[in-house]
Amino acid sequence: MNIGLKKLHASHILAISFIVLISIGTLLLAMPFSSRNNDVSILDAAFTATSAACVTGLVVVDTGTQWTVWGQLVILFLIQIGGLGIMTFSTFIAYIIGRRLGIINRNLLEHSVGLGHGATLGRLLFVIIGGTLLIEFFGAIVLIWRFSYHYTFSESIYLGIFHSISAFCNAGFSLFSSNLIAFQNDVTINLTIIILIILGGLGFLVLFDLKKFSFRNLKLHSKIVVSATFFLITVGFLLFLFLEWNNSLANFSFIHKLIAALFQSVTSRTAGFNTVPIESLTNSSLFLLMILMMIGASPGSCGGGMKTTTFAVVLALIFSRLRDQRQVHIFKRGIPEHVISKAIGIAFFLLSMVTVACMFLLITEHPGGLHSEGRVVFIEVLFECFSAIGTVGLSMGLTPVLSTIGKMIIILLMYVGRVGPVTLALAIAVKKSPRLRLAEEEFWVG
């Protein structure tokens, strides 16, 4: 067993571990005790298990009405394990029982949560597990208090815990059929969910580094993540507010317009909650959300997508080339060439996946349709693909009516969005460079 593991790279083991988790979740959700009417197909169970384990939030059946309490607890378990990473839990268990962690186990944890070689394993595990439970606990307390205004205390406890874990893990699963639209005017619930999403999307290494309480003293990785997160939230907030001021936000008060725009800017990058109907948004707003969904959260976090650091490196590369600078740099630090190559590879890979998946979905979900009849379908399909690859969970209503092939395509996108970018980057990193360089020759590009 150990010999077999040594032959596998850490990225391969992580990818397999998610398949195992999804398989276990599928079997549990397919059991009679998980669904209310016992009419959920194995494919729908697999779709839900993948969406939960990959912290996406896309659903083919309503979470609050179609699944029993046991089924919902299975989903919550998948969200928690999938959000933090399987290797985080297994390493934590090995750590607390005093088992010696070998090189393989430490490498797995590094690749799973973005652990730096200089970090202390025990302290990092404490931050990840203890910090997560503490943040989710305080989030649940606030949500329980607010939900108690509308539900019984026992119902509020269940709703508060479920939505706190779902928000911090950036899953976007909600027990309400209309997601959080019914609470669009509740400032406390909105701000609590926003804070939970941001903390869960920063990445565990950044949370570990934020103890310094000084931006100047942060590591370069943390500086990029914090800056990119602030930039994306701000730009998304301002653009969404401008684009939807007289549309979906027309009947909101001024303060509620600000809260709704901020909420959608934060949740669209990875979480998938919504307080305004997605299908009612303008085309320009939908395109904005697609961009945010594609970028996603940060490395080592609960979210998926291209990642904020990849986005920052690609932007830095573009600006450096436009200025004819030989070295790409961020915060007066040069970016290594292999990091730039990984960033470009990840971005191109995800965009290629969306392109291919969108093409197949246009065939399977609207076969033989004319362009004039399928223009709405096109943006729905494209939006669905970006949502799946970014593990976001927002939908214009296409998810529940997907065909069998369509569901399988989205399942693949959700899986790739959660583990694909990391696996691709590590697969490139472990390949040995050839000792001999081939002869180079100039040719025209552009």
Image: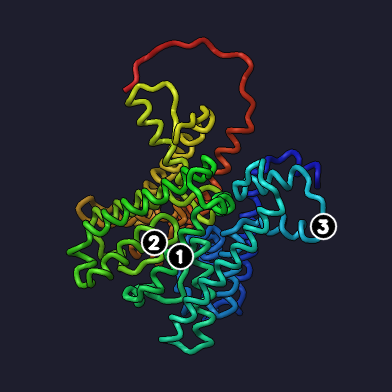
- Mark 3: few, some, or many residues within 10 Å (few <14, many ≥20)? few
Q: Residue 234: x and y, percent?
A: 33, 53
> Disc 1 on helix, strand or loop?
loop
What residue is disc 3 on? 98
Figure check: 31 above or below 373: below
Dot 3 falls on a residue whose secondary structure is loop
Q: Earlier in the sequence, mark 2 or mark 3?
A: 3
Please identify the residue farthest to the bottom as the structure is shown. 152
The amino acid type found where label 2 is placed reads Leu
**Which residue in the structure is indicated by mark 2?**
394
In the visual, does 443 lie left or right of 155? left
Colour basis: rainbow
Disc 1 to disc 3, C-alpha distance: 35 Å
Closest to the observer, 46 or 187: 187
Point out residue 195 in the picture as x, y percentages from the top left corner: 45, 64
Mark nearest the camera among 2 and 3 is 3
Does dot 2 land on a helix, a strand or a loop? loop
Q: CA distance from mark 2 to mark 1?
A: 8 Å
Would you say the residues marked 2 and 1 are in contact, meaning their CB atoms lie under 8 Å apart? yes
Q: Nearer the viewer, residue 92 or 9?
A: 92
Q: Amino acid at mark 3?
A: Gly
Residue nearest the viewer, comparing 415 with 308: 308
Viewport quadrant of the C terminus = top left
- Residue 180 image offset from top left, x and y in percent: 38, 73
Residue 172 numbered tag: 1
Given this view, does label 2 or label 1 mark the residue nearer the observer?
Answer: 1
Toward which corner of the image does residue 422 lie, by quadrant?
Answer: top right
Q: Residue at x 71, y 58 (%)?
A: 92
User: How far, Cα to Cα, is label 2 from label 3?
Assistant: 42 Å
